[in-house]
Image: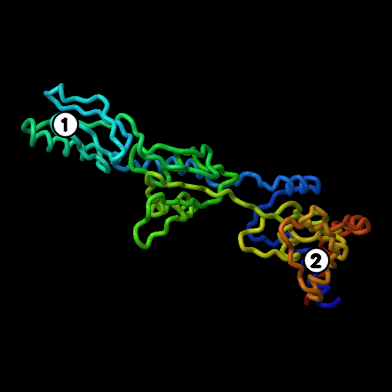
């Protein structure tokens, strides 16, 4: 037996026992493969509950309630001891100003409620009374909105009622759609960013949510758009006389060869007719090509490995004769093992 034959035999016998690199695998029949290709989707990612982690981080990160006033916001003004100066509903105009008795217009744009109290109090002290006690409460938040789009449970427009960060925005939108969301978020800034900063920030949600890298929890501002791209999954399929047939995910930037595909499927069964392997490839017009491949030549190093394309179906037919022989060999496994040992030596 030559070296190529030994290598092929070892591939068939030992591949099922060699732990393959972790790859998403969905067991399928041929009929299910066709449905899977047509749907173009995968089953939900069995991973850590990112939404639970997101909600926990959002709840734990309650930063100071420093909402900044803007046009359209409605505030209630109370001047203690002088009810005539109280105002139940003051709406900030398009420039962020309000009008008050005795002091005319007051610019409140960009101030917190506490800062607005100090400014109004100072103006009243200068014109009306000494040491006024002023309280400002925000009644309606109308000036600051963000949009959260993409693979989230409730995409839409959300109102900011306090200083907010990326995890807050995602939590407001109900969290990620686990089976669709790519583990990244894009924060598109509405305002011109500071010098040197990009207008769009890409955040690795795996690092933020799974590894807890809080430095990635960037603030979001009025007018920002947060988007979570939908995950695009690519698969190849291995069916027939292999140990673990089904659909296998192609990772980003990965190239899959025929031998790697067979290894992902746990290798060939003893009954496999490896010389009659077929690769079924879809054409853009919906038709298919069937490519005949002699896998034994590839595994022996007598032919170049074949590069697979997305959605390729590798089919390895079985041999009836080998199926009968398999039952016999199962009873003499020890003899076969000895044979392999002697041959390799």
Identify the residue shown where x is 30% and y is 29%: 139
Quarter of the image containing the N terminus?
bottom right
Say if 266 sits above or below 2 in the image.
above
In the rendered image, which quarter is residue 160 located in?
top left
Mark 1 closeness class: few <14, some 14–19, many ≥20 residues within 10 Å: many
Asked which secondary structure carries label 1, the reply is: strand
Query: Residue 103: in sight, yes or no?
Result: yes
Q: CA distance from mark 1 to mark 2?
A: 90 Å
* Residue 277, image x, y percentages: 84, 62
Out of 202 and 110, give the one closest to the viewer: 110
* Residue 122, image x, y percentages: 12, 38
Residue extending farthest left? 130
Out of 239 and 337, give the one closest to the viewer: 239
Numbered circle sitting on residue 288: none
Residue extending farthest top? 83
Residue labelled with disc 1: 134
Residue labelled with disc 2: 337
* Residue 286, image x, y percentages: 79, 52
């Amino acid at each position: 037996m030559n070296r190529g034959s030994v290598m092929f035999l070892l591939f068939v016998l030992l591949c099922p026992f060699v732990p393959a690199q972790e790859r998403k695998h969905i067991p399928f029949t041929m009929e299910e493969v066709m449905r899977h290709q047509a749907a173009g989707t995968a089953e939900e990612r069995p991973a850590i509950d990112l939404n639970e982690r997101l909600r926990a981080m959002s709840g734990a990160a309650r930063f100071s309630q420093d909402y900044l006033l803007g046009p359209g916001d409605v505030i209630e003004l109370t001047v203690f001891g002088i009810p005539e100066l109280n105002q139940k509903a003051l709406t900030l105009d398009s420039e962020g100003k309000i009008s008050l008795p005795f002091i005319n217009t007051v610019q409140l744009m960009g101030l917190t409620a506490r800062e607005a109290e100090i400014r109004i109090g100072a103006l009243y002290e200068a014109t009306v009374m000494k040491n006024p006690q002023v309280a400002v409460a925000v009644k309606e938040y109308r000036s600051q909105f963000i949009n959260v789009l993409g693979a989230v449970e409730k995409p839409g427009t959300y109102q900011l009622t306090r200083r907010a960060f990326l995890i807050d925005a995602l939590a407001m939108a109900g969290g990620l759609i686990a089976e669709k969301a790519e583990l990244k978020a894009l924060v598109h800034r509405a305002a011109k960013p500071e010098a040197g900063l990009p207008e769009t920030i890409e955040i690795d949600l795996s690092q933020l949510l799974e590894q807890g890298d809080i430095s990635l929890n960037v603030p979001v501002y009025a007018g920002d758009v947060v988007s979570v791209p939908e995950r695009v999954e690519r698969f190849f399929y291995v069916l027939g006389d292999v140990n673990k047939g089904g659909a296998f995910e192609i990772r980003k930037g990965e190239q899959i060869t025929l031998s790697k595909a067979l290894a992902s499927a746990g290798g060939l069964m003893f009954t496999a007719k490896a010389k009659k392997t077929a690769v079924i490839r879809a054409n853009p017009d919906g038709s298919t090509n069937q490519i005949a491949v002699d896998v034994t030549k590839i595994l022996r190093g007598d032919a170049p490995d074949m590069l697979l394309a997305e959605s390729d179906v590798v089919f390895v037919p079985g041999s009836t004769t080998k199926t009968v022989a398999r039952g016999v060999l199962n009873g003499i496994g020890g003899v076969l093992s000895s044979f392999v040992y002697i041959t390799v030596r």
